[in-house]
Amino acid sequence: MTSTSERLKFAGFTLLIALGVALAYTVLHEGGHALAGLAFGGTVREIDVNFFNLGAHVNIDGSFSRYQEAVINVSGAALPFLVWLVLTLALPKEGSPLVLWAKFIASAGTLCSLLAWVVIPFLYIKNDAPAGDDVPRFLANSGLPPLAVAFGALVLFVGGWFLFVRRFPGTRSIWNVIIKNTGKPVPDWRWVLVGGVMLTALIGAGILVTSTLGNGLPSPPKGYNSAATVDLSSRDRQAETIASFDLPKAGDAAIILRVSGIDTSFIDVTLVPSQGVPLLLMHGEDFVSTYSETQNQYRLPAGDYKIVLTSRKSSGILDVYFRFP
């Protein structure tokens, strides 16, 4: 009969491995983006692997072709998968139940992250894909059919599990340790343990998929408030108001514009006052960048102000942040 201390050790082991897998996946995911950007001559300006707040990201400066952008987009998912594949083929087939359980958790975390690449292409077709995610950026930059990408990711997901089962046939012993009770009625604690283990696996997979769905951009700068997030791939925009603010009296206003994954033939962002001359905040033609930021501070008279965007339909996300005295 398994003692309470042994049950707690097993549960603690499961949680520790799940956290380790989540951290390792996050490092490899952002590292994949960074290595691809460096390979194409870019410069890594910032890298953050804090998976606890789902805010992991990497910022790369450089001028890249659409093909290179597509490679950078997919590298975040490709590097963890390739590392998992090498380890799966290299590690011994046999091992203790706990070692096999660790391999199972690591495989679940890595392979379940591919589900984002299965699901999001369908959202992309409906124009409902999450703004700034790697998958829609890859689809926009590569020009590949969304259904082909979804099918390819599904093949990797199913094939990965098939390879795991073939490489580690002793995985069934995991369930013998958790479930089997030599013909006696299964104690309630074992069903509770099974439920806890499955819940932990689902939560871990959810964290990885949610991290993959994150927009990949840093949080608003200290002291700034988010005013607008615009997906430039949705449509052309002609003198469209994307944000506004009111100054009851004259004072300073700071505005940050961030663009990510942009590849556009034309973009123009202007600050338009209710009275007076408009101020140009950003302008670009044949503008390609993984990440770019402009920060402006103005002494403005009292009045109403609008941020107006004119752009051609293209890949990329525009974020606007305000700070007032």
Image (spheres, rainbow, N blue to C red):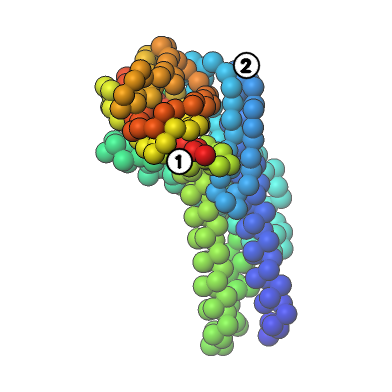
What residue would you read off at disc 1?
226
> Is 185 drawn above or below residue 141 in the view shown?
below
Check whether the beta carbons of the residues at disc 1 and disc 2 lie within 8 A of each other. Answer: no
Q: Nearer the viewer, residue 199 or 301?
A: 301
Mark 2 Cα-neighbour bin, 10 Å: few <14, some 14–19, many ≥20: some
Mark 1 Cα-neighbour bin, 10 Å: few <14, some 14–19, many ≥20: some
Residue 279 visible in the displayed image: yes
Quadrant of the image containing the N terminus? bottom right
Q: Nearer the viewer, residue 164 or 237?
A: 237
Please name the residue shown 29% across and 36% down the image. Answer: 127
Mark 1 belongs to which amino acid? Ser
Please name the residue shown 59% across and 22% down the image. Answer: 61
| Residue 30 x, y percent position in the rendering | 60, 37
Please name the residue shown 67% across and 77% down the image. Answer: 7
Q: Is residue 228 left or right of residue 109?
A: left
What residue would you read off at disc 2?
41
Residue 85 visible in the displayed image: no
Q: Earlier in the sequence, mark 1 or mark 2?
A: 2
